[in-house]
Amino acid sequence: MTHRYTLLVGGVVLPGHDEAAASAIAWAEDTVIALGSDADVRAISRGDSHVIDLGGATVVPLGEGTDAGWPTDAALAIGGRADLAIVGADPRGIDAADPRQLTAIALIRGGRVVAGELPGDAGHEHPPATSGPNPLRS
């Protein structure tokens, strides 16, 4: 496993499966390595991590489909695959009887940005994991 971690801090992380919300998540390659407070997640870094401030955005697990949605059967867990979506608003107020798609800022599959871009990350290159049109841009 690489020592280059990606840390998302300063937001709301909804792991799913009725787990308590966190404010930060970290992954290395394709694996989630930390969920918790900003301080706890920052503490795993050796100083060379790619730290992204979510600016209050929300992270949700990304299920099998190509769109972010809530509620979802997917979950984020330490040791699990880093498949997640960053959305602009906390979706917990959505009625479970009326699931809907969320407007995604970025979609991450296996730890790689596959659509959109990480908040404040316009200057970094993230090679696409798949080819084809960007589902976030019309």
Image: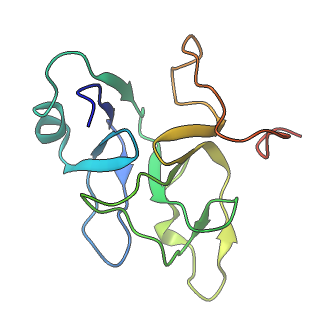
Query: Among all residues in the image, which is located at the extreme top?
Result: 123
**Residue sitting nearer the eye, 41 or 31:** 31
Query: Among all residues in the image, which is located at the extreme right?
Result: 138
Q: Which of the image's four quarters has the C terminus? A: top right
* Percent of width and height locating residue 29: 38, 39
Residue at the (61%, 68%) spot, across then down: 64
**What is the total number of numbered labels drawn onto the structure image?**
0
**Residue sitting nearer the eye, 133 or 53:** 133
Residue at the (47%, 72%) spot, across then down: 74
For residue 50, above or below residue 10 = above
Residue at the (26%, 37%) spot, across then down: 1
* Percent of width and height locating residue 73: 49, 78
* Percent of width and height locating residue 126: 58, 24
User: Which image quarter: residue 111?
Assistant: top left
**Residue sitting nearer the eye, 29 or 8:** 29
For residue 45, above or below residue 15 = above
* Percent of width and height locating residue 123: 57, 10
Residue 7 shown left or right of residue 63 in the figure? left
User: Which image quarter: residue 2?
Assistant: top left
Residue 57 shown left or right of residue 126 in the figure? left
For residue 137, above or below residue 62 = above
- The colour scheme used here is rainbow
For residue 96, above or below residue 59 = below
Residue 136 shown left or right of residue 36 in the figure? right
Query: Among all residues in the image, which is located at the extreme front?
Result: 1
